Every structure is written in structure tokens, then in C-alpha cells.
Image (cartoon, grey):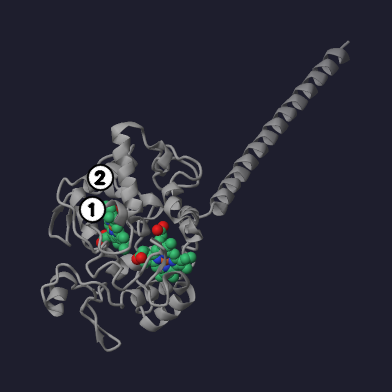
Amino acid sequence: MNQHPSSAEQTEREERREFAALQWFAVVVTLIVVISALVIGRQIGEDVQNDAPPLHPARMATNAADAAAPAAGAATTASASAGSSGAAPQPGAQAASSPGPVKKTAFAPPAADQIPEGPMGDVIRQGEQIFLHTGANAKGFVGNTLNCVNCHLDAGRLANSAPLWGAYLSYPAYRSKTKSVSTFSERLRGCFMYSMNGKAPPDGHEVLVALETYSYWMAQGTTVGEKLPGSGYAKLPKPEKAADYARGKAVYEAQCALCHGANGEGQRSGDVQVFPPLWGAQSYNWGAGMADLHNAAGFVKANMPLSRGNTLSDQQAWDVAQFIDSQERPQDPRFTGDVASTRKQFHDTENSLYGTMVNGKLLGQGIR
Ligand code: HEC
Ligand code: HEC
């Protein structure tokens, strides 16, 4: 009789112990599962981050491929449609603030096919056409065969290629170049005077209105005063060795001359400039932003050779920029009548070769 309760007690105790052991087992298994899930999850996250192509070269490549289309002969339409190709980005979508592995996504401006109908849409489209085919649509204000899109790729959309959405937000701003606060419109006028080697349209002219409207539309969804990643041109750090003309010439001959010509004259097909000139009478003048080595090196590194951006080393990009900007081009419209004093007033920086001696020749004499 005594045995029974005690054995029952014992069984109960054993059962409780087993149960406790089971509970412990369950807890340990759960912990192991949770910890490995965390570890694996993190690894996957890291892998995604490592595998994710650096965003901006990828975008560059896509864009450059779009831009390459004119080369294939469809020059007049390819640039215009470049912006509407690919997945239509959400206007205002700003991946910069989205979580996840890809952090520095540039702002995604609306695609060309999202330009609204109506009178506002008409002016936006007019601005787009001026941007793509500048000489034909801004008659009287262009002094060379370049188009705005040659340097502001993908119809002014491409991040790090001074996109219009970034530019629109950046003005009014104080500029050391003019020693005053410039409005957006004044900035546009500047590109006509220097990059296009032309004449600035007068204030309020429909060409400026159209370009400003196009830029405003592209910046939909941004915030005034915001400094968006991808604005302006990518700035390359100074190279290890001082940029060198001879090394730059070698890079040019191997990787650029095919499209831009042995003498930097570019290539034309009938009326259409298929590959833009890099120097000479039809290129940007000495006052242009591209005549600044820092801008040129950054642009070339990110975008050239076309469709193979970011394949040159930083050194090669600086060397080839040195070579290009050591060639003669139209005079700076601010020319004082004397190269030395013009350098002193407007080009007194290590990034300008204006007024320096290169291979025994004084640069900055200008050509017509
Ligand atoms: C030869 C190349 C070239 C061409 C062609 C060109 N630009 Fe530019 N543009 C530049 C460079 C380089 C800068 C930056 C200059 C600087 O910051 O010193 C710039 C700056 C700008 C900016 C200000 C960008 C910013 O983020 O502050 C605007 C706006 C602009 N250009 C509009 C135009 C328009 C409109 C045209 C055509 C009428 C045009 N550009 C043609 C090279 C060019
Ligand atoms: C496959 C042809 C091709 C090659 C190769 C190429 N480019 Fe270009 N480049 C272009 C085209 C096309 C544009 C204009 C892009 C646009 O309008 O979308 C351009 C634009 C430019 C511009 C700005 C516009 C101008 O005329 O100033 C510079 C500067 C430039 N290229 C430099 C270079 C350099 C330096 C190399 C060699 C490292 C190079 N390119 C190789 C086709 C090419």
C-alpha cells in the first residue's frame, strides 16, 4: 500500500522531469533556429549588398546605351526617346530615402511619356526639343554643333551628369564665376554663351522659358533647397601623378578617336552631329565648364567611352581631360583683348589650361 503512492509519486516526478527536459529541449531548439535565422538572414543581406552592382555605374551603362543609339544612325529620335525607355520611374520617387541595401539611388525624374497634355505640356516638350536638338530649336543662340544633351546625358536625366532635376533645385545660388547670385535662368544663359559658344537669349525669351519649364517638370516631387545625390557632375579626386598630355593623347587615340575623330572634330552625318566635337571651332569655348579639368575628368570618367563609363582609371580620365583641354577652341567671350589678363581675371586656377604654354604653344588664342 505504501509502495503505490510512492511509485505513483515517482512516476509523476519522472514525468515532470521529462516534461521539463522536453521544455528545455524545445527552448534550446527554438533558440538555435532563431539565431541561425538571424545569422543567415544577415549574410543574405550582405550578399545582396555585395552583389548589387554599384548603382551609378549601372545607370551610367543603361544611359550610355541609350545615348549610343544616335551613333547607330537614329540620331534624331533616339535621344528624344532615351528618357522614356526602360521602366517608367515614379515621378517624385526618391530612393535615396528608401531603406535596404541600395542607399545612394539617384532621384528618378518622370519619363518623357509622362509629359502632360495641354499648354503646359507643350512648353515642357518644347524645352525637351531644345535640349535635344539645340541648334535647330534655339536658332540664333547657338554658335557650334553641340546639343545640351551631349554633356547632360539622357535628355538631362542622368545622375552625376548635371541632371536638370538637380540643377533646378540648386538656384538661385552664389557663383564664384560671376561673383553674384545667379538665378536658374541666368545659369541657362551661361550655357548658351560658353558651352554652346553662342549668344545668351534675352531674359524672359521663350527659349529660356521652355528650358526652365522642362527642368521644373523634371524636378517634380523634390523639395526646394534639397541637395539631391547625383546633382552636378561627379568630382574625381586628383590623380596620383600630375595629369599628363602624352599619356592623355595615348588614351585618346586608343579609346576616343574612333568616335570623336583624330582631330577632335567629332562626326557628322548630313545635318546631324552624330558624335560631338571635343575641340576646334565647333566645340565649347574657353569659358565653358568643360574647359575646367576637374569637370572634364569627372564627366569622362563617369560617361566615356560611351556605354563604357567607369572603365578608365582616375589617372586615365585626368590624363585624357588634360589632353582634350590642351587643344585650341573658340575664345572666351569675356576675353579682355589679352590672354594673360583674361587668365588672371577668369582662369586663375590649376584646373584651367587657358593662358598656359603647352608643347611650346600659348593656349587661349581662340579659333573661329
Ligand atoms: C560641352 C558640354 C556642355 C554643353 C553642350 C552644355 N552644358 Fe550645361 N553644363 C556643362 C558643365 C560642365 C556644367 C557645370 C559647370 C560648372 O559647374 O562649372 C554645366 C552646368 C549646367 C547647368 C547647371 C547645373 C547645376 O547642377 O548647377 C545647367 C542648368 C545647364 N548646364 C544647362 C545647359 C543647357 C540648357 C544647355 C544647352 C543650351 C547646356 N547646359 C549645354 C556642360 C555643358
Ligand atoms: C562610341 C563612341 C564614343 C566613344 C568611344 C567616346 N565617346 Fe565621348 N561622346 C560620344 C557621344 C555620342 C557623346 C554625346 C552623348 C549624348 O549626346 O548623349 C559624347 C560626349 C562626350 C563629351 C561631351 C560633349 C563634348 O563634345 O564635349 C566629352 C567631353 C567626351 N565625349 C569625351 C570622350 C572621351 C575623353 C572619350 C575617350 C575616353 C570618349 N568621349 C569616347 C561618343 C563617344
Task: Choose the circle earlier in sequence order: 1 or 2.
Answer: 1
Please identify the quarter of the rendering in which residue 195 is found.
bottom left
Name, please, the residue furthest toward the top. 1
The answer to whether residue 27 is above or below residue 175 is above
Local SS, label 1 = helix
The answer to whether residue 37 is above or below residue 3 is below
Label 1 lies in ligand 1 vicinity (Cβ under 8 Å) = yes
The residue identified by callout 2 is 212
Q: Which residue is drawn at 20% across and 79% down?
A: 365
Circle 2 crowding by C-alpha within 10 Å: few under 14, some 14–19, many from 20: many
Whole-percent x, y for residue 207 in the image:
23, 48
Judged from the image, the quadrant occupied by ligand 1 is bottom left
Q: Label 1 sits on what residue type?
A: Leu
- Left or right of 44, for residue 326: left
Q: Label 2 sits on what residue type?
A: Glu
Q: Which residue is drawn at 22% across and 48% down?
A: 208
